[in-house]
Amino acid sequence: MAIALANGLGLAVAIYATMHVSGGHINPFVSISAALARRIRPAKAAMYVACQLAGGVLASLLLVYVTPDAAEGSLGARSLAEGVSVAMGFTVELVLAFLLVFVVFAVAMDRRAPAALAAVTGLGD
């Protein structure tokens, strides 16, 4: 439970920190979906996605640099993924990404949603 709460808090802080720059877009699925829904321009979405992917690569490199003595797979990803096929992992990721985008659109991007909820999620137009 503590790990989930820490991840959620970290995500909320990251969204609030980028709100004035990108409207809180820190996930490529959200940016692509916003462009497809014509909530942001495709060029802006492409820039956001490129920056999000670069940020993910830089974060991975930083993790490798900070934990050079960590054995391969000792950070939890490998042990959690044993017995999960690529198709299963992709399907779960696709379903979770859909749910994320659904919630973002329902709470933060829909003009009919209460404005107070957008502040809670940290996402704006």
Image (cartoon, rainbow, N blue to C red):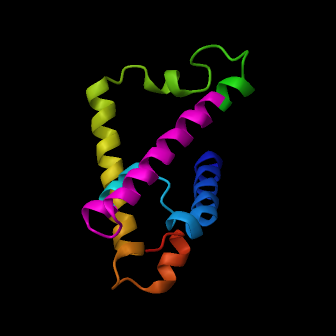
Q: Position of residue 49 (x, y in %)?
A: 42, 48
Q: Quadrant of residue 8?
A: bottom right
Give 74 or 108, whichever is nearer the viewer. 108
Q: Position of residue 36 (x, y in %)?
A: 25, 61
Give the overall secondary structure of the magenta segment: helix
In reply to whether residue 55 is colored magenta, the answer given is yes
Q: Is residue 92 above or below residue 23?
A: above
Report whether 93 appears left or right of 12: left
Which residue corresponds to the image point at 59% horizontal and 31% vertical from the top-left?
Answer: 60
Give 109 or 45, whichever is nearer the viewer. 45
Report whether 78 appears left or right of 1: left
Which residue corresponds to the image point at 38% horizontal and 51% vertical from the top-left?
Answer: 46
In reply to whether residue 81 is colored magenta, the answer given is no
Which residue corresponds to the image point at 27% horizontal and 68% vertical from the top-left?
Answer: 38
**How many labels were placed on the picture?**
0
Which residue corresponds to the image point at 51% horizontal and 84% vertical from the top-left?
Answer: 116
Looking at the image, the residue that sits furthest to the front is: 43
* Image: magenta residue range: 34-61
Report whether 15 appears left or right of 38: right
Q: Position of residue 41 (x, y in %)?
A: 34, 64
Q: Is residue 87 above or below residue 15?
A: above
- Quarter of the image for the C terminus: give it: bottom left
Residue 30 seen by the camera: no
Residue 102 seen by the camera: yes
Q: Is residue 112 above or below residue 20?
A: below
